[in-house]
Amino acid sequence: MQPFTIANTSGITASPTKFYNWQNYRCAYEVHQPIDSSADCTPLLLIHPIGVGLSRQFWQRFCHEWYQTNHQNIIYNPDLLGCGESDMPRQAYKPIDWAKQLQHFLHTVVQKPVIVIAQGALSPVAIELVKLEPNLIKGLVLSGPTAWSVTTKNAPKWQQNLLWSIFNSPLGNAFFRYARTRKFLVSFSTEKLFASSEAVDEQWLNTLIADAKNMGGRYAVFSFLARFWQRDYSGDIASIQQPTLVVLGDTASAISKEGKKETPDERLADYLACLPQGRGMKISGRNVLPYESTAEFVATISSFVNELS
């Protein structure tokens, strides 16, 4: 799949896929920036969600809208290990693994402080990253973070290992082959991710289907389904000293059973009660705001980003 490019329509240059090495793995990323911009704005570091066919391509619409509205920040958009065009070793991935990957990326590629924008259940990666590199994080935007009751609960290790053993088997392979079909992707996106079925468009589906052709991406997905990302992050969240903006959809829902009774207002209140420098906003949409409600999401985070730039 070709990287998203917007250079000819809005005065932006989008780099071809670039690569760097981390722990002997080849990791992919791309850089978006305004042409001939002299503005010295804080760069944005994007953290894409994990799921069937998901990669840095999730942020296509966001990057386009960001520059269409005359923002000047350079955008760094990496593929996490196991996703997109990065290497896909057969291993169980945890947020700390991806955070260490991004720590290396900050040191070797970006080499200056950033504002991190993390999507959904990959918010723990941003939380781990700010623990590792507080001096290189100026602020965080958490888009549709996981239900508070899930974010503050330790997943039993026996359960994680059992689920991983099931997924990391021929049964898991068969499930992934089914999960990458158009029928499943339409159903899951409509029932779990988008507020409106009409928003589950061809661009979304075609991007997922194209990326999911690579069976190597199943290990990151299985790590997510086995809940290797889940532990009690309340103490870490309470220790974040950087300004943090939490953005939730007004119809935000929980994927897992634990958080289903939680309303968007309750989730927002819980995060803000814990964050030392937290602020929050609700916008229209459900669980994939940078894609489903792109213009409103960009407008919502703009003043926060400009403050820190």
Image: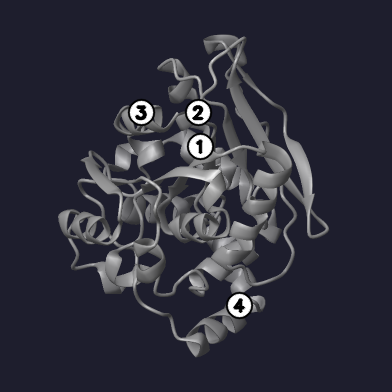
Tell me the kind of residue under disc 3. Ser
Asked if disc 3 and disc 1 are in contact, CB closer than 8 Å, the reply is no
Quadrant of the rendered structure where residue 260 is? bottom left
Q: Earlier in the sequence, mark 4 or mark 3?
A: 4
Read off the residue under disc 3: 302
* Furthest-right residue in this view: 24
Which quarter of the rendered picture does the C terminus lie within? top left
- Helix or strand or loop: what does disc 4 sit on? helix
The kind of residue tagged 1 is: Trp
> Residue, x 29% and y 32% (percent of image)?
300
Tell me which label, 3 or 2, sits earlier in the chain.
Answer: 2
Question: Which amino acid, by three-letter code, is at mark 2?
Answer: Cys
Q: Which amino acid, mark 4?
A: Leu
Question: Measured along the vertical axis of the image, is residue 73 above or below residue 23?
Answer: above
Circle 3: element type: helix
Q: Nearer the viewer, residue 16 or 304?
A: 304
Identify residue for label 1: 59
Mark in the foreground, 3 or 2: 3
Q: Residues within 10 Å of mark 4 (few under 14, many from 20)?
A: few
Q: Residues at badges 1 and 2 in contact (C-beta under 8 Å)?
A: yes
The residue positioned 58% from the left and 68% from the top of the image is 94
Q: Can you give x and y, in whole percent of width and height, for residue 7 in the image? A: 61, 15
Instruction: Say which residue label 4 marks.
Output: 171
Mark identifier at residue 63: 2
